[in-house]
Every structure is written in structure tokens, then in C-alpha cells.
Image: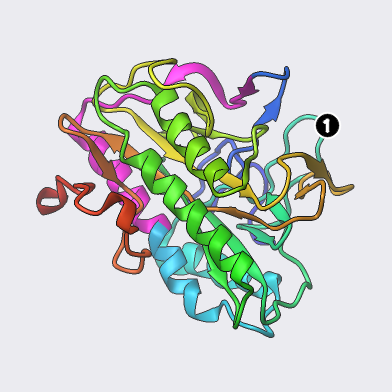
Amino acid sequence: MPYSSNLNPLGNAIKWTICPIFEHYRSTKNCQVVDNQGMNSVFTAEKDIQGMREAGRLASEVLDHVAPHVKAGVTTAELDRICHEYMRDIQKTIPAPLNYQPPGYPPFPASICTSVNDVICHGIPGEKVLKSGDVVNLDITVITPDGYYGDTSRMFMVGEVSVLAKRLTQITFECMWLGIAQVKPGASLGDIGHVIQTHAEKAGYSVVREYCGHGIGKVFHQDPQILHYGRPGTGEKLQEGMTFTIEPMINAGKRDIRTMPDQWTVKTKDRSLSAQWEHTLLVTATGVEVLTWSEGSNPIPDCVKGLSFRPNLANA
């Protein structure tokens, strides 16, 4: 691949990071952020907010670009190539996952994550051919020339999929947006996790707990950790200027996971389907701005109709 693990195409030394989050349990209760634990992403300078808007726009733009290619007969490696070349040649951005190698792990060998059917996250693109009936999550993270990270993922349905797959995909989408609707200054992290967990479990699904959302800015993964389960009114309070992701991973069966021998791919233990959606967000003075929204993004679900999630669009 054209990028080394130490040098990006712009000639700057960087620290590579992984999508969607590379969070692992260090105990039975807390997942840990590996890049910059203990530091929150809170921006007050307009240049930083604009930098994050740009990163979010570019990340979503990659998904818009690759969307027409997600169809039966394409390999996940081909989808990775399409995204990689678009980031490198058109956007001049860096694919954050490529060659990332935490201690004890092999380098992640691709520019995006492609998680198909029972793969929860960190699916490695390869020779797998998508077929009608598959569902796949494409997770994109770009680093802009100014060093800001934009992180987003979408589910895609290939051909005619099962009623179960459609319902799981839709419920997970609603979970993400219900979580987004909780975001405002003074809200608690537990408010986000609670609505996601409640909606998923009411539908008969389970929430993956080993992986969570995360603060993001000029570092990929930092506090706060955004758990997709919890109790309302608990946890850290949100404040204006925070930037972080909400990215629930919801299983059709039990929440238990298994990690494949490649040390990256995470699947459902019971081989049930899994789904995930992700947006990067900014806490504004009045609520929330979805930084990774684009014209190609899926329309918001009925459960949050009326939510104002681009309050600064006129100035963006």
C-alpha cells in the first residue's frame, strides 16, 4: 500500500489510529480510550470548530462517493480501494486506520472497515464478495491536512435483504438518532446510553458493551467515552464545544462477542446479525450539530422528527 506507518502523503509524521474506535474492555465495566485517555475534546476557537466541520463533511463525502458501488458482486477490497483513492487523490485526506498497529497487534491493513452480516466492527476488507441479502457497515475516518478527524459509518443493504435485517438496521439507526437527540449542554452521558439501550432492548435486541463512542478532535480517541447503555442522569455532563461520536452496535441475538484470529475482526458469538451507525457530533449552545451529515446521509427517522441538528448550517 502507498502509505507507510510513519509518513502520510502530505509528508507529516502522524500517529495512526483505527476505526471505528478500537476500544477494549480493561475490566467488566469500562472500555478504555487508547489514544488520549483523560483528555476531553472541547473546542472554543472558531478555527477548530470549522476544522471539525470540514473533517466531518469530508468523512461523509467518502460514504456518498462509495455508496453507488455497494452492490452484489463487488468485493470489500474493491470498496476499500475506491475509498482509499478518493481520500488520497481527490480529498488529500488520510485514511486513519491504515497501518495502525497498537502494541501486540498486527498492522490494520486497510483504509476502511467493512463489517458484513455478523461482523460487529473492525472487519478487514478482502476478497469477500457481497451478495444479495447481505448487510454491510462501512466505517470511514479521515484526517484532514490540518489534522482534524472525522468519523462516520453507515449500513448498506445489498439487494433484497430479510425482514430481520431491515428491522435491525432501522432500529439501530433509530438508536443512534435517539442518542443524538439527547445531546445538549448539561445533559449526562447516561442520558445517551439509556435511550439507546431502552430502544434496542424494547425491540428484542442487545447492545454490544465492549465498544463505545469516543471524544474526537485532533486526536482520534479520547474522553469522553460514550457508552451505548446506562442510566439517565449519570456520568459526565456535556458542555458546549465537545466533539464526540455516537456509534451504537446492536445485535439481533445476544450481546456476546468473539474476536477472529486476525486479531481485528469482531463477530457476534452466536452468529446473529449485527448493525451499526455512527455520526460525529458537536455540542452547541442550544443543542447538537451533526458534523458528519451530508446530502447523501440517510434521512432522520420519525422518532426524532423536528430535531434541529444543523443549527449553524448557514455559517458552516
- Residue extent of the magenta highlight: 30-59
Residue 143 showing in the rendered view: no
Q: Which residue is drawn at 23% across and 47% down?
A: 309
Name the residue tied to disc 1: 104
Q: Report helix, strand or loop for mark 1.
A: loop
Locate residue 23: give its quadrant. top right
**In the rendered image of this protein, does residue 91 appear above or below residue 29?**
below
How far from the left and from the top, in percent, is residue 281?
A: 34, 40
Is residue 204 rendered to the left or right of residue 176?
A: right
How far from the left and from the top, in percent, is residue 141?
A: 50, 50
Is residue 64 rendered to the left or right of residue 66?
A: left
8 and 267: which is toward the camera: 267
- The verdict on residue 38 being magenta is yes
* Colour mapping: rainbow
**In the rendered image of this protein, does residue 59 appear above or below residue 243?**
below
Residue 237 showing in the rendered view: yes
Count residues near mark 1 (Cα–Cα under 10 Å), then give few for <14, some for 14-19, many for 20+: few
* Mark 1: amino acid: Gly
The number of numbered discs placed on residues in the rendered structure image is 1
